[in-house]
């Protein structure tokens, strides 16, 4: 009798494990996926890159970090010195950033194209960012249709900080209405959901 009872108990334990084990595993996997956190970092002078960054962030439920000039330059300075600095891959002074990247697995880094390259403020950000081992998505907005050089230079700068550029995208803003920019940003975000 005792032997039969022991066998019944063992069988019940085995059945319980079979029912609950997949649920436990599922829970563990889900928890792991939910732990993946994304930060969208951007610089924007006239608001286009900000619109793209915020739209993408809202689509993929990411946090947002705005890179700001130490002192916002006027238009003349931006067009002459800004373009000059961007073209040469230089950086411009930015406000201190207090957001640590250790809590994030994936970082989006975006900037407007100036003279074919990324605005110098984003270079300043990348130079001080702890990107080692991070998956990075680079993006730009531009008036025209050329983004290759800017994406390439951003990629090189991220890789110099040991970040891994996994993907990139660009949004043309010239002659584009705000709601069209939002639509393009939403389309771009789809692949990162
Ligand atoms: C100084 C300066 C230089 C620019 N150079 C280019 C360029 O070389 N190619 C281009 O397609 N757009 C160029 N643009 C347009 C911007 O890249 C475009 O308007 C961008 O979406 C602006 O982003 P923002 O509103 O976030 O600053 C330039 C804009 C500025 C202010």
Image (spheres, rainbow, N blue to C red):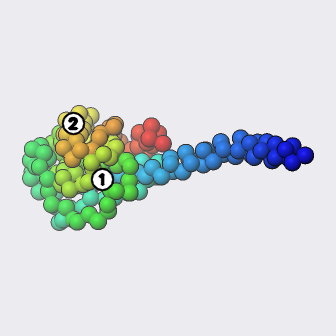
Element marked by disc 2: helix
Q: Say whether disc 2 or disc 1 marks the residue closer to the N-terminus.
A: 1
Residue 7 placement (x, y as % from top left): 82, 42
The image quarter containing residue 129 is bottom left
Q: What residue do we see at 34% from left, 43% from top?
A: 135
Write down the residue under mark 2.
Answer: 152
The label on residue 42 is 1
In the rendered structure, are the residues bearing label 2 and label 1 in contact, judged by CB atoms less than 8 Å apart?
Answer: no
Vertically, is 44 above or below 137?
Answer: below
Say whether residue 177 is visible.
no
Q: Disc 2 to disc 1, how far (Cα)?
A: 17 Å
Depth check, front residue: 130 or 26: 26
Q: What residue do we see at 30% from left, 48% from top?
A: 109
Q: Indicate left or right for 171 with 80 as reference.
A: right
Residue 158 placement (x, y as % from top left): 23, 44
Residue 167 placement (x, y as % from top left): 34, 37
Q: What residue do we see at 9% from left, 47% from top?
A: 84
């Amino acid at each position: 009798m005792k032997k039969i009872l022991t066998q019944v108990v063992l069988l019940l334990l085995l059945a319980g494990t079979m029912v609950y084990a997949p649920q436990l595993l599922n829970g563990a996997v889900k928890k792991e996926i939910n732990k993946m956190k994304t930060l969208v970092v951007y610089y924007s002078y006239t608001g286009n890159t900000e619109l793209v960054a915020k739209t993408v962030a809202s689509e993929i439920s990411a946090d947002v970090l705005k890179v700001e000039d130490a002192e916002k330059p006027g238009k003349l300075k931006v067009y002459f010195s800004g373009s000059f600095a961007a073209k040469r891959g230089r950086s411009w002074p930015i406000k201190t950033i207090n957001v640590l990247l250790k809590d994030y697995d994936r970082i989006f880094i975006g900037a407007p194209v100036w003279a074919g390259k990324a605005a110098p403020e984003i270079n300043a950000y990348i130079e001080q960012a702890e990107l080692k081992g991070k998956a990075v998505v680079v993006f730009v907005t531009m008036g025209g249709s050329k983004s290759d050089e800017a994406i390439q230079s951003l990629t090189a700068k991220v890789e110099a900080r040991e970040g891994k550029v996994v993907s990139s995208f660009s949004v043309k803003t010239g002659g584009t209405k705000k709601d069209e920019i939002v639509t393009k940003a939403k389309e771009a975000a789809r692949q990162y959901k």
